[in-house]
Image: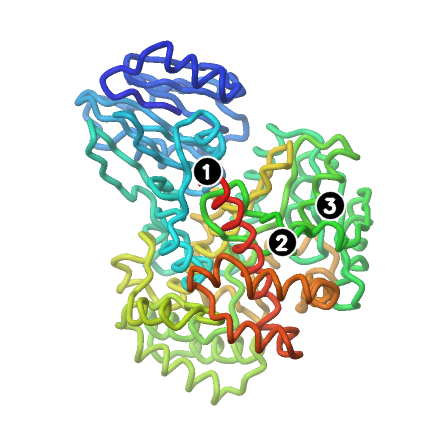
Amino acid sequence: MVQPNGGLAVEDIDEISRKAALEVIARTDRLAILANDREACVPLPHCDGFVLGTLFRQGTQSPLTRMPDLMGGEGSSYSVGERLLKGYWGGYIAAWLDGQGEVHILRDPSGAVSAYFRQNKGSIMVSSDLKLLVKCGLLKPSVDWHVVADMLFAHQLGSSATAICGLEQIMPGSETVTIGAAVRKLQLWSPQSFVDSCDPASSEENARELESVVKSTIAAWSSVHSQPLLGVSGGLDSSIVAASLVAAGSRPKCFTLITDDPGGNESEYARLVTDHFRLDLDTCEYRLADVDLDRSVALDVPVPSGKIHEAAYNAVVRRSAQATGARAFFTGVGGDNVFYLTHSARPVVDRYMRYGLSNGLLQTLRDVSRVTGASYGQVTMEALRVYRARSRRWMWRTVPTFLHADVLAQRQGRRFEHPWMSGWHDIPPGKQGHIVKLLRAGNHLEHRDKMLNVPVINPLLSQPVLEMCLRFPTWQSVTGGIDRSIARRAFSNDLPRSILQRREKGGPDGFTVKIIRKQRPAITERLLDGILVSRSILDRRELERTLSNDDVFRPDIAPRIMTLLDAEAWARYWTTLA
């Protein structure tokens, strides 16, 4: 998207269109929209503006191709952005001009569409594709090493800052307003607004409502994207997506990924799900050949936010999509986060802060004890610690491992925050933890695989599901000593009992260990003699010590090595383009 400041010449817009291989979908005196799909551009009524992406009206399941009267009467005090957020949802970026000549750009709360922001030659450029800005000559990339260090330290915390100089990111639920060279940011949507302070409905009522909203949301996405491919792990979240797709009349093709070690082979559970719904399942293995130490999985985004082993998963998705003729890839990503999978004592504190000492508080104490395996005394002591610390500002859990002493010294005592974390001292500790989990899920979405030629749909992170789950009290997420209790209850009539009762989950940990075992010399050379060491971001001596012994295989170290390898590959790529 291009916002001309005072009018960008027609020939300049046409030149950008030619270089980017995009069509000029819409153009006003000061706003131009370029895209590869004309049908994905919906005009906004009563203003010069458009929504680019997929848009649904609240409570409906059909995508909009035209907007009804958005303004809702002249006397309404809500802005265009607020009305979009209150009455609509989807995966989109909206841009419009107001009566004062200001340009507004809104990114939807799910973050389904990337939005990179740059001021260039007196104009404002917003693109969902970083490389298009480079290709069109609108951005000459230069790495901001300070931000690289920040991102490795405050791991998984999204930020409007990017590691490419001169480029910002519009955050989910945020509106950027520009007039001339002036820019201001408004956080129009925040999860704090949906933390309900009223007496909650019962677990049963909330479960019924959650089932309805999840199924309706996934039915809406299914109406847009036929022939879906679904990644199935046999865990709760992807199973819920499978159940909802089938309920919507869809027959997704499914795959599951396995590793050599038993802990990473979940095909038995995946098969239970697909057999239950009579769906096809392809079992695929993680392949070492799919992991290229020279290629970051976050190559196409302006932040080093990935892990190198994720390349193997991405490769399977691309092959499966091609083999099945899929038109979209659905996932259960974010389910743990939005349904609030927790092993903390925070639900106990939340219930105490709402009702004080009560029988319900004792029940939540027992529930947390069952979920965590801790004794009643241990849960009580941890709840007291959380309660006493509730008035302190939240400190993002940073990761200092392998970072250079200078990097750590520069960040000592610094608070890393996010717009969703500001002013939330009145939010109960459990809901603070819930919001942090949502931030981590959003960060994961940023390095989506741009090489995949079909849309990626993460329906459990859609706005209606987010808003509903934020309203549920945290203690209901552990009711009966069962994690994600409301979600399990919501789909108790849809899923096999063995899936509903499953508590442990596998993962690719064995594959990360295999990568290190097979490529340890190359990994050692790459990290010790890499750009991140030369820039004094990583501690060479500590890396060398760890890579030379079996500490490198520890479950807290191997994933960190995957992160650093991907950041090194990212840095090398963007340095060559500078």
Picture quadrant where residue 42 is located: top left
Amino acid carrying label 1: it is: Ser
Badge 1: residue crowd in 10 Å (few <14, some 14–19, many ≥20):
many
Amino acid carrying label 3: it is: Val
- Left or right of 22, for residue 172: left
- Identify residue for label 1: 114
- Point out the tag, 1 or 2, that comes first from the N-terminus: 1
Q: What number is the disc on residue 316?
A: 3
Badge 3: residue crowd in 10 Å (few <14, some 14–19, many ≥20):
many
Give the image location of residue 176, x and y in percent.
Answer: 29, 36
Mark 2 vs mark 3, foreground winner is 3
> At x 39% / y 54%, what residue is drawn?
145
Amino acid carrying label 2: it is: Asp
Furthest-bottom residue in this view:
377
**Mark 1 and mark 3: Cα distance apart in space:** 23 Å
Give the image location of residue 124, x and y in percent.
Answer: 31, 28
The correct choice, above or below, for 43 with respect to 324 in the image is: above
**Could one spot residue 367 in this view of the protein?**
yes
> At x 42% / y 26%, what residue is drawn?
137
The correct choice, above or below, for 110 with respect to 455 in the image is: below
**Mark 2 and mark 3: Cα distance apart in space:** 20 Å
> At x 60% / y 42%, what residue is drawn?
449
Q: What number is the disc on residue 484?
A: none
Camera-side residue: 365 or 575? 575
Badge 2: residue crowd in 10 Å (few <14, some 14–19, many ≥20):
many
Mark 1 vs mark 2, foreground winner is 1
- Identify residue for label 2: 237
Give the image location of residue 521, x and y in percent.
Answer: 68, 66
- Point out the tag, 2 or 3, that comes first from the N-terminus: 2
Q: Secondary structure at mark 3?
A: helix
Q: Secondary structure at mark 1?
A: loop
